[in-house]
Image (tube, helix red, strand yellow):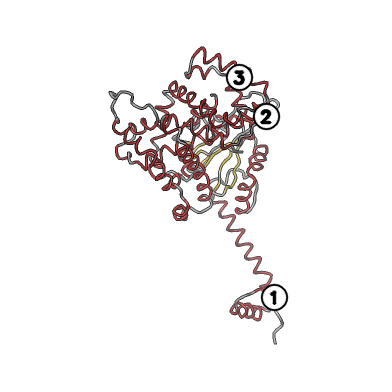
Amino acid sequence: MSEPLPLSLDLVPLPFLHRWIWRIDNHLHWQSSPTFVLLPIICLAFFVGFALFLERSNPLAHIPVYRSLPRLLSRFQFFYDAQRVAHDGYWKHKGGVFRVLRWSGWVVVVTGRQLMEELYRIPEDTLSTWEAAKDEVQTLYTFGEQVSFRPYQLTLIKSKLVRHQDQVVRDLLDEAIPAFEEIIGQNCRDTSDWVEFDMNSISKVVTRTFNRILVGRELCRDKNYNQLSIDFTMGVYIVSIILNLFPSVLRGIVARAISQLPRHQKMGAQFLEPLIEERKACRGRDDVLDKPNDFLSYLIDGVPEEELDTPGLVARLLTVTSATTHTSASALMHALLELADRTSYAEPLRQEAAKALNTHGLTRKGIENMTQVDSFIKESTRMHAIGCVTFPLKAMKPITLSDGTYIPKDSFVMSSVAVHFDEEFYENPYTFDGFLSFGQGRHTCPADTLSHMFSRH
């Protein structure tokens, strides 16, 4: 009779596995056989060799890694503790570059002001924000095929809204005042006590105000449409995070199960279809009196005929809203909190704003003359960045940085916001004091110009 197995068969649920393990034990004389020692060593050597093969075949293998960990652990490390990875990596590789493994793949992190400034001077056709967004936000599934592959809305923001900034300023201010009054101010009446309001209230103010320049006065004040805009934005972020957890071959299947885009397009069409038909009737005509002067009109005039379907136009409008409201609401919320904590800033900022508007009126020039307001908002942004790293850029062709670092095509590049707390660049970096923030350069999102303009209101 054979000796009992050292492994408890109670742990093996299937009868055929009992017989299989017993045969292995009898054949190898389990504990006495050299195979008992060699088998795990061979398996370990195989996995180590496979890991080395993957690393050597990695086109970014020449760039130092933040920490050498198994790939799965590295992914979890950045997923759960990105703040520490970005901070420690910055100080360990300051002035150079390093790479980290996110769940979606490797990314190069640039440190030091010189390399960062060099990075943001590289043209969009070499380092692309939008191409990075296709992967980062999974635009094919969150924004739709038309928006993802033919992003006309980006060009129109630059050529129309930014060019007509005087009108944009007037519309923003005209809508921001009643929006604050109705959403926040009405809760502050007849009380001298502190009134509590949350991020959701700020999001409603920002969404309504931005929708004024996107779809006009009437629809921007529709609470249901504004809530749709907010829900779409949150849906984009949630769905993109989930999709990036899956390999690319499975994303289409998963997206069909979780994507909110068709539902949001259908809901948006209920609000927008009458406006779309009205704007189509004025398409390309300059002789129309009182032609609406909003982004929807620019969009209908600027896209090709085949792109004028209602679902596609709805997706483009909601995409622009999602790109502006989330970042603006976060920046505005932090600026207001800093102002509430440092009330001595309030009067100088108020006086500067009044002087600029009295001198230049509701124009871009008036906004540009609010230098103290601009400094305050930038300092708040520096202290309270949305993330620990910047939004990534995608290399559309090979790049060699001034320090000799070679970045292959299709690589993702970002910078660490730990530079905001580097004493080499900021005296007393942990003290709030009107320093300028990063985020400037060729790759600033077109919507960021509008976001920053809104915050100064």
Residues 26 and 166: in front is 166
Q: Which residue is mark 3?
A: 349
Q: Position of residue 297 (x, y in %)?
A: 36, 31
Check the image and name the residue furthest to the front.
190
Which kind of residue does numbered mark 1 sit on?
Ser
Say which residue appears at 49% left-offset and 17% top-offset: 365
Q: Are marks 1 and 2 in contact (CB under 8 Å)?
A: no
**Of the image marks 3 and 2, the number of the one nearer the N terminus:** 2
- Based on the displayed image, in which of its 4 quarters is residue 202 positioned? top right
Q: Which residue is mark 1?
A: 8
Which kind of residue does numbered mark 2 sit on?
Asp
Say which residue appears at 29% left-offset and 37% top-offset: 305
**Of the image marks 1 and 2, the number of the one nearer the N terminus:** 1
Q: Position of residue 100 (x, y in %)?
A: 60, 45
Residue depth check, mark 1 versus mark 3: number of the one nearer the observer: 3
Q: Which residue is mark 2?
A: 193
Label 3 secondary element: helix
Label 2 secondary element: loop
**Which mark identifies residue 377?**
none
**Of the image marks 1 and 3, the number of the one nearer the N terminus:** 1
Say which residue appears at 46% left-offset and 48% top-offset: 260
Residue depth check, mark 3 versus mark 2: number of the one nearer the observer: 2
Label 1 secondary element: loop
Q: Position of residue 425 (x, y in %)?
A: 65, 27
Which kind of residue does numbered mark 3 sit on?
Leu
Q: Position of residue 156 (x, y in %)?
A: 39, 31
Label 1 vs label 2: CA separation?
69 Å
